[in-house]
Structure formats: structure tokens, C-alpha cells
Image (cartoon, rainbow, N blue to C red):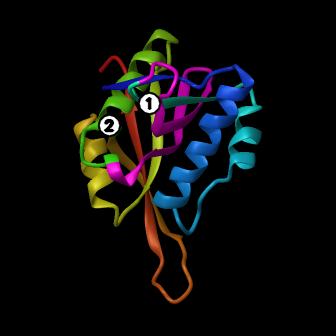
């Protein structure tokens, strides 16, 4: 059973969740992982929020962080900055559930559209976003650069609420 909720304000639970997210980042974004400190600094801004996916363990107080979504809301526009699922739990619909929950949260806050950026060669993510009614609205040519590899375009995708 999975639970998706906003990041706790309680400092010890918050710190544990951020460390778990940083650990997942290191696995799913090995060349560009955000650290616990980076995440904490981002979340210090009023416009930043995070949804956490917990897997319920046997004991009620021992939930395991298995996914997350860091997003920003500025007036009626939101943007997903980071989203990830622990590799052991990928391909189980968790990312879709995170986005569904995010849609609920954003619509209740009168957000009009949601943006995200994705590597043009990340076909699995693009397919997920298209299923979630995102459409590509812009392409940044050669945005992602890695040593000894050709540059990869970034796609800007948008979900518009109320259409």
C-alpha cells in the first residue's frame, strides 16, 4: 500500500524524508542528483513544495520513502522540478499516482497549467506524461550536454487545467 502526502513540517520526519529523496535522486539521476542540502534549500522558498510517496511497512510509524515530486507554484502556474521513483518500485504506476495527486492539489489551488521539462530521449517519461494529458510545447535544442556524448534536446511539456 502506498500513501502520497505533502512533505512533513515536523523537522525529524522532514529530514529523514529529504535524505531518502536524496538517496533516490542518486540512483535515478546519477549525473545530476540533488543532495539533501540542495532539496532543503529549494524547499526553504515559499513557492516550493514536495509530495512524498510512502510504502506502508508493518509498523505504522515505519513508512519507507519510495518516490517524490518537487514542484513550484507561482500564482496560477506550476512546474515539476523533480520527480522520481526508487528503482525497486518503478513500472508500478507510482509516478502516475504522484501526478494524479499533484493534479488534485494544484486544481484545488486554482492553478491553470503545469509545466515540466524532460530529455527528448527519455521515451518512457514522455509516454507517461502524454498519458497524463501533457503536450510538448517547446524544444530546447542541445540543452542536455554530457562529456563524450552528443547533446540531447529538452522538451517543455504542459498540462492545462479546465480544458
C-alpha span from label 2 to label 1: 10 Å
For disc 1, the neighbor class at 10 Å (few under 14, some 14 to 19, many from 20) is some
Vertical comparison of 150 with 142: above or below: below
Callout 2 crowding tier (Cα within 10 Å): few <14, some 14–19, many ≥20: many
Q: Which residue is mark 1?
A: 54
What residue is pinned by disc 2? 94
Determine the image quadrant of residue 158: top left
The residue at the point 27 percent across, 34 percent down is 133
| CB-based contact (under 8 Å), mark 2 and mark 1 | no
> Who comes first in sequence, dot 2 or dot 1?
1
On whether residue 65 falls in the magenta region, the answer is: yes
Give above or below for 75 relative to 16: above
The N terminus, quarter of image: top left
- Location of the C terminus by quadrant is top left
Residue 39, given in percent of the width and then of the height, sits at 68, 43
In front of the other: 95 or 103: 95
Q: Which residues are magenta?
A: 59-88
Residue drawn 46% across the image and 18% down it? 60
Task: Please state the horizontal and vertical placement of residue 99, each as a whole percent of the image.
Answer: 37, 31
| Towards the viewer: 96 or 152 | 96
- Asked which secondary structure carries label 2, the reply is helix
Farthest residue toward the front?
59
The numbered dot on residue 106 is none
Q: Position of residue 45 (x, y in %)?
A: 75, 31
Residue at the spot x=34%, y=66% of the render?
121
* Helix, strand or loop status at disc 1: strand
- Which residue lies at the image location 32% right of the left edge and 37% below the top edge? 94
Amino acid at each position: 500500500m502506498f500513501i502520497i502526502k505533502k512533505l512533513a513540517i515536523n523537522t525529524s520526519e522532514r529530514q529523514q524524508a529529504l535524505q531518502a529523496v536524496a538517496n533516490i535522486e542518486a540512483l535515478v539521476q546519477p549525473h545530476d542528483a540533488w543532495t539533501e542540502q540542495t532539496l532543503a534549500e529549494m524547499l526553504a522558498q515559499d513557492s516550493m513544495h514536495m509530495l512524498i510517496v510512502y510504502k506502508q511497512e508493518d509498523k505504522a510509524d515505519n513508512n519507507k520513502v519510495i518516490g517524490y515530486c518537487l514542484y513550484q507554484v507561482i500564482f496560477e502556474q506550476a512546474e515539476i522540478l523533480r520527480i522520481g521513483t526508487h528503482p525497486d518500485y518503478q513500472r508500478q504506476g507510482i509516478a502516475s499516482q504522484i501526478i494524479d495527486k499533484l493534479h488534485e492539489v494544484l486544481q484545488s489551488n486554482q492553478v491553470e497549467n503545469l509545466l515540466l521539462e524532460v530529455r527528448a530521449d527519455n521515451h518512457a517519461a514522455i509516454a507517461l506524461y502524454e498519458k497524463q494529458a501533457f503536450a510538448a510545447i517547446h524544444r530546447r535544442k542541445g540543452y542536455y550536454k554530457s562529456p563524450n556524448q552528443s547533446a540531447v534536446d529538452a522538451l517543455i511539456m504542459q498540462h492545462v487545467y479546465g480544458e
